[in-house]
Structure formats: structure tokens, C-alpha cells
Image (cartoon, rainbow, N blue to C red):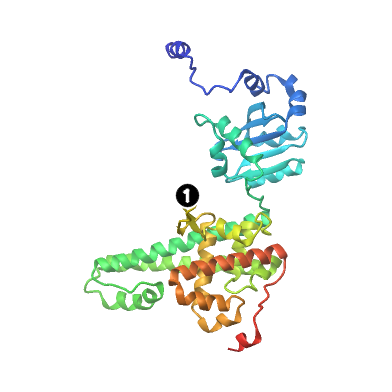
Amino acid sequence: MRHLSVGSRMGWTGRAPAPNDTQSRLGAFEEHEEHTHATQDRLRSCTHDWDTGKNTLHMIGLDERGAVVLREKVSRNRIAARLVNMSPCLVGIEAGMATHYMARELVALGHDVRQVPPAYAKPFRQGHKNDFRDAHAVAEAVERPSTRCVPIKTDGQLDLQALHRVRSRLIGNRTAVINQIRGFLLEHGIPVRQGHRFLRQQLPQILATRTDVLSPRMVRIVGDLVADWGYLDERIERVTDEIESLAQTDVSCGQLMTAPGIGPIIASATVAAIGNGAAFAKGRDFAAWLGLVPKQMSTGDRTILGRITKRGNRYLRMLFIQGARAILLHPKSWAKHSFGPWLTAAARRLHHNVLTVALANKLARIALTVLVEGRNYETRVAPAAAAA
């Protein structure tokens, strides 16, 4: 009781206060069900702040004037039942893990559901951080026409995305095993050239002939790591084959694979990330979302450009960079592409890494155009240029 009395003297009870008395009354929705119909008539937008690590989410409802008319906390498994009898309204959810499934459920109930990136909602939060103020910030952000929301992914996109994430994790584990083998050998004075191909070729001979510096225990440890390496290779190959088979049967992936530098892995990862590309108005926006554009630090009518922003999907950006590097390895085939003259001229004046990023930017724009227009890539080059 001492803590409560001190809190009472200081005007603070230990809990974040509601913005006003009306919001406090409406926050206790289950205790005051007589406000249900009046709230639904005034409700314009309803936002959720959903922490996927918890079992509850916080809701804020705004009326036409922007005043808060709904403020309550709902358990995770009751959110659909809570909104099933509510008239259709704009529902904003902070984008994150496990939000696509809930968004599809609310769309089926007739609501206009939009997923707001946390970075776009943060500037609208006022005062100290708590769950209800986060939800209010999402409510403010979702109503701004300039806010770019995250498209709702289908089950097929989520399955394809899961395959790519598993493959990426397995590749990282394999790289860690290879580096550990090289480190153990280097500690015993046996350097091996970087690259898994060279280590795979030299390792049997090293284990058989360098017993003068390698103890039997170390030979056994390295042998176990080689077995782990082989297991990871098999897993990666199975997952890659599954991704490639799905890409061959998907229409959008097939259209993307007609573009230069884009194979089954890049095509399927692009479809899993952006679907049909309707979230982007033009290819430049998609390239900027991937982080393949220079960072701007402009002021006073001066344009200052730095290194690339590296925003957006890091995995997809890495794949487009690899696709660009694959094209740059074969200069003789540049003339067969529509961007051949540009690439030839850019190669004379740009650093190799800058050229790689510029080409990845162009491939990303081409990929979005193919997705949005729903057609194959068309190579438009002059016959003389192609023959040269």
C-alpha cells in the first residue's frame, strides 16, 4: 500500500494513462457493452499494434474527426471474433511476423486491411512508448496517402519464402563449417586457398599425408566436419531442386526467367517478396526499395550522393547483385541484350563494383516491368549490333 500512496501523491499510478476519460471508458469495452453500437457508427479506422511475442494486441479506433472512440486490448485468438460484427472499416496493422494470416482473415470479413511498416509509424508516436500509443501511431500513419503499406502475401508466397529462408540458413551453416575446417588446418600450419572447391579437392590428401602435424583426434574432428558438410550439401540440393521445380510451374517465375541474369532462384525469390509487383508504381521504386540506389544527403540545393542505402530485402538484393556479376563475366554476350550499348559504355568509366550495382538496379527495373505487365522479356536490339 505504501507504493500506491506514493504514486497517488505524485499523480502516477504505475500504468500508462489513457489520453482522456472517453478513451478510458471505451477501453473497458467488455465492461461497457452499451457503447458498442455508438462506437461502430462513429468508427472510421481501427488499428492494431501486434507484438508477435505476446498473446495480446492493442486496438485504437478513430472517428471521422480523428478522435479516439475505441481503445481496448484483445487476445490473439479473439481478434477475428471481435471484428466480425463491426461494420467494414480501414484496419491498419503494424507489419511483422504472423500478420499476413490475420490480415487475410480480416479481409474476408470485409475490412480494408493495410500493413504499415514500423519505420513509417514511428514518427507519428507522441510521448513515451507504450502499446496503445504505438497503435495510435499506426492509426495516424495508415490514413496518410503517402504511406507505402506492405502487400498481403498469399499462402503460396509464404511457402516459397520459407523455402528460400531455409536454403539461406543452410548455406550459411555450410559456410561456417568450411571456415571452421580451414581454421583448424591453419592452426596446424596447413593453409588452404579460399573457396570451397579448393578445400574439397585438397582435403582428402591433407588428411592422408599430413599426419605429422595432425593428431588422430584432429583427423577425426575434421572428418566429422566433412560429414556435416556433405549432409548440408544434400539438404541444399534438395531445397534448391524444390524451388526450381516450383519456379518452372509458376507463370510469373517463367516470365521473369526470360530476362538476362535472372534464373529460378532470383525469379522465385522476387515473386515470393513482391507478388505481381502492384505495390510499386515504377521500376525505380522497386530498385530503391531493394537499396540499390545511392544514399542522398542533400541540403541547400546541393545534391550529395553516397554509397547505396542497402534498404529493403537484403536477400533479394544479394541475388540481383549475383545475377549482375554473372552477366559481367561474359562481355561477349552483352550485345545480345537491350542494355548492351549502355553496359559497354558504362564499363569504360565506372569501377567494377559500381558497374555491378548499376546493372543490378537495371535488372530489378526489368523484373518489375515484366511482373506488372505480365509478359516475357523482349530483347530489342539492332541486327547489326547483335551480329557484332
Image coordinates of residue 7 in percent, x first then y, are 46, 14
Question: Which quadrant, please, contains the N terminus?
Answer: top left
Image coordinates of residue 203 in percent, x first then y, are 34, 75
The image quadrant that residue 218 belongs to is: bottom left
The image quadrant that residue 289 belongs to is: bottom right
Residue 309 seen in render: no
Residue drawn 46% across the image and 13% down it: 4
Q: Is residue 15 above or below residue 257?
A: above
Instruction: Tell me the SS state at disc 1.
Output: loop
Q: Is residue 75 left or right of residue 81?
A: left
The residue labelled by disc 1 is: 300
Q: Callout 1: few (<14), some (14-19), or many (20+) C-alpha neighbours within 10 Å?
A: few
Instruction: Point out the residue furthest to the left here.
Output: 212
Residue drawn 28% across the image and 65% down it: 217
Residue drawn 47% across the image and 54% down it: 302
Q: Is residue 130 above or below residue 122?
A: above
Residue drawn 58% across the image and 23% down it: 19
Image coordinates of residue 104 in percent, x first then y, are 70, 46
Identity, as a three-letter code, of the amino acid under mark 1: Gly
